[in-house]
Image (spheres, rainbow, N blue to C red):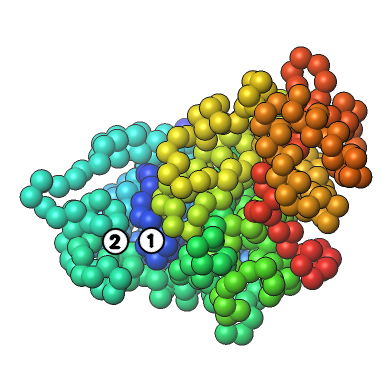
Amino acid sequence: MSTSLYTGQCIAVFGTASLQRYIFQSNRLKENIGASYLAKYWLDKGLIKATKADTTSWDEYKANPLMSPPENPVDTSKDVNLIYVGGGNAALLCKSLDIARRAVKTWSRELLEKAPGIRVAVGYGEVNDSLAEAYRAALCDLGHCEEALPFGSALYSLPVVRTCITTGLPASERSKEQYEDNQYISQSAACKRKQVDSAQEDITKVFQSVLNEGQHFAIDLNKLGGSEGEAHIAVVHADGNGMGALLNELIKDQDDADFLHHLRSFSASVSHLSENALKKTLQYLQRALPLDSLHNPQSIFPLRPIVYGGDDLTFVCDGRLGLDLAAFYLKEFAKGTIKVCGEDRPVDACAGVAIVPTKFPFAQAYGFADELCGLAKKRRRDEGDSTGSWLDFQIIQEGATQSISALRDTQYRSLEGQKLHQRPYQVPEEWDDFVKILQEFQSQQWPRSRAKGLLYALTQGPGATNRFVEGAQWRDMKLPRVNGMDENEFREGWTGGDERSTSYFDPLESLDFYIEVKAERGDEE
């Protein structure tokens, strides 16, 4: 016989299918910003408003993820109670399956009208023995919904319909942007663009403590920095490690009140940690502004968060800031802990940084950043280490179409066949060595022409590198050295043995795409 006080009630779990595709479907930053805002709103405030969910308990956890279990985790007088919301996911506890379905129907109807294009999914789990069991069932149902049609294949238009210039979807109205000269755009693109003002208001409110008076986040990639004709942007995507495994620990069978408390504490602490890490990163950059090497208006902050609020983060910034800021964020993220079944657990993340020309297709740039983050996670798994942050990056040239893995297989080997790159890097240990080498090459001891000459020699192989290094030593230029470096590598540029490698290629390739933020004004962290 069931002992649950919630027998007969229903948990509804909300998620999004192809959310990243929806947000980064367009090459227009305004549309990416608007799409991110719409996704965040309708899986948060819009959901709560449409379903009339009671948020009293969840609001307390948001304010203090470390709070003690409340006496009344659910307001039994309400038809719908919010369990948690954040990071594109949410869960409701409803008095019955019928009430849950009616609430979802009301919400999804508004979603279709006001945010066309977002693909959402809902899973239901009726309570029999415990809330944890019902939540597991809801997650399973959600997974089936996300994999089912229409999510598996896109629904397009008849050939006679105009095509949107930014999304490729059926176009329904003319663009109001002057530079697009009344061309046609889709309903989805138009809706995203209309949200830019709301998105600006929302993000300014969240990061008000970081911005100076009169300062705002960019809505135009050309305003992030860089000189005309040579500007690059960095698209950074970071994702928490092992969050799924930690969530599985939470949904084991336990008392209903403990389950609600642990689930809410977990969700709130993850959001709290990632938002704090991002704020620290923004403050780190703010302390160094204005950076003399940037060419952006002082009123525009040279970093734009696009996706934030959960364990994953995507932001875009001046191309020379991306590497340092991504590494700083990973370090800050790893300093915190999250609540898992009442315990403080350390957590870390991986990140990918795609550095591309400003005019490069933004949707493709995000795809590269996402792939790089995946490569960093793969390296973490391959190392057999259950902890640690890793960072991977790639400088992308115009016209690049290959995947990162294919690009490296074909273009990142010397003429003698050795692998040139060593990325991804573990943060902070390996990354700090990378930065030390890079900064020594940026110093006056190594003129830029000589550093570029060494980069070319590395692409030729160990023989050509050794000859170049011998010539440099006659000019009193020694290779940078870090602790634990192979003696042969310090003398000749490559490690010894059969599997030869070099620590110098990655820093040299990054010479023009790295600024250590605090170095500009000597600020201490």
- Residue name at image x 33 percent, y 38 percent: 145
Percent of width and height locating residue 435? 77, 48
- Residue name at image x 23 percent, y 56 percent: 164
**Picture mark count:** 2
Mark closer to the observer (1, 2): 1
**Local crowd size for mark 1, using a 10 Å CA cut-off: few (<14), some (14–19), many (≥20):** some
Instruction: Give SS at disc 2.
Output: helix
Name the amino acid type tagged 2.
Ala
Residue 263 seen = no
Instruction: Determine which of the numbered discs, if any, sits on residue 189 in the image.
Output: 2
Percent of width and height locating residue 181? 23, 70
Is the C-beta separation of discs 1 and 2 under 8 Å? Answer: yes
Q: Is residue 480 above or below residue 92?
A: above
> Along the polypeptide, which appears first: circle 1 or circle 2?
1
Name the amino acid type tagged 1.
Arg
Q: Is residue 310 left or right of residue 105?
A: right
**Residue 77 falls in image quadrant:** bottom left
Q: Which residue is mark 1?
A: 28
Instruction: Give SS at disc 1.
Output: loop
Of 450 and 157, the residue lying toward us: 450
- Residue name at image x 27 percent, y 68 percent: 180
Q: Is residue 57 left or right of residue 457?
A: left
Q: Is residue 148 left or right of residue 512?
A: left
Residue lying at the far left in this picture: please name it: 160
